[in-house]
Image: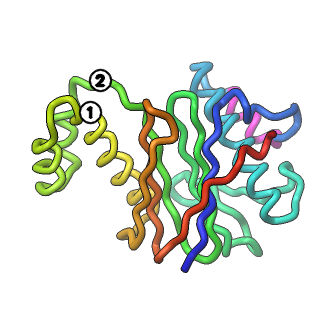
Amino acid sequence: MTAVSIWTVALATCAGPPGVLPAHEQARAAAYLNREARDRFCAGRVLLRRVLGERLGLAPTAVPLVIAPGGKPALSPPHTGVHFSLAHAGALVVVAVADGEPVGVDVERVRPMREADAMARLAFSAEEREALLRLPEAERQQGFFAAWVRQEATFKLGRPAVTLFEWSPRPDHRAALAAAAPASVRHMPDPSV
């Protein structure tokens, strides 16, 4: 069974001291025109570098992150046996880490969406759409985002999920983890505390 660790942290708590991000990530962050997007990118990378640094016994700045095909960050050899996934939404950042098996994670802020029905028709299976329609109207918004994060986590995994784990990190957020093998999941404390 694969052990998966998940960190869910508020943006403000994972900003980190200056110098955690290497120059190329600082330059990428500076290219964002939208401040919120820039803050999410920085917070996500700081949290990712802290978590992976602790796991690998490295300083956060020494974590050998590379950009894999498709634009996703990955670890360079010899650390390719450590798999991770990163997501952010609203004021939350989520990182999932597993040894030996790929993982995918997603988080979304639950909010009104006029286009939810159209998105469900395009992205969800017939069974998922039917399950959503069977929900009482008051529960459909939560149901839509629960299905959405499951799909996104599986997409990030890049293959069919053997384990799907869902949770609500806050009342107004939904999150899901997809793992390529049977997995045990544990929530970790904020590494910046």
Apparent side of residue 20 relative to residue 33 in the rendered image (left or right): right
Image quarter for residue 34? top right
Kind of residue at disc 1: Gln
Identify the residue at horizontal 33%, vertical 45% (top origin): 146
Coordinates of residue 89 in the picture (x, y in percent)? 50, 34
Are circles 1 and 2 on residues that touch, CB within 8 Å? Answer: yes
| Magenta span: chief secondary structure | helix
* Magenta stretch bounds: 21-30
The relative height of residue 82 versus residue 116 in the rendered view (above or below) is below
Q: Residues within 10 Å of mark 2 (few under 14, many from 20)?
A: few
The amino acid on which the numbered mark 2 sits, given as a three-letter code, is Pro
Left or right of 82 on screen, residue 181: left
Residue labelled with disc 2: 112
Q: Quadrant of the N terminus?
A: bottom right
- 17 relative to 56, above or below: above
Q: Position of residue 159 (x, y in %)?
A: 39, 69
In the rendered structure, does residue 149 fall within the stretch colored magenta?
A: no
Q: Which residue is mark 1?
A: 141
Let me know if residue 28 is in the magenta part: yes
Looking at the image, residue 167 sits to the left or right of residue 85; the answer is left
User: Where's residue 32, x and y in %?
Assistant: 61, 26
In the rendered view, would you say 91 is above or below 147?
above
Q: Residue at x 69, y 34 (%)?
A: 42
Q: Element under label 2?
A: loop
Crowding at mark 1 (Cα within 10 Å: few <14, some 14-19, many 20+): some
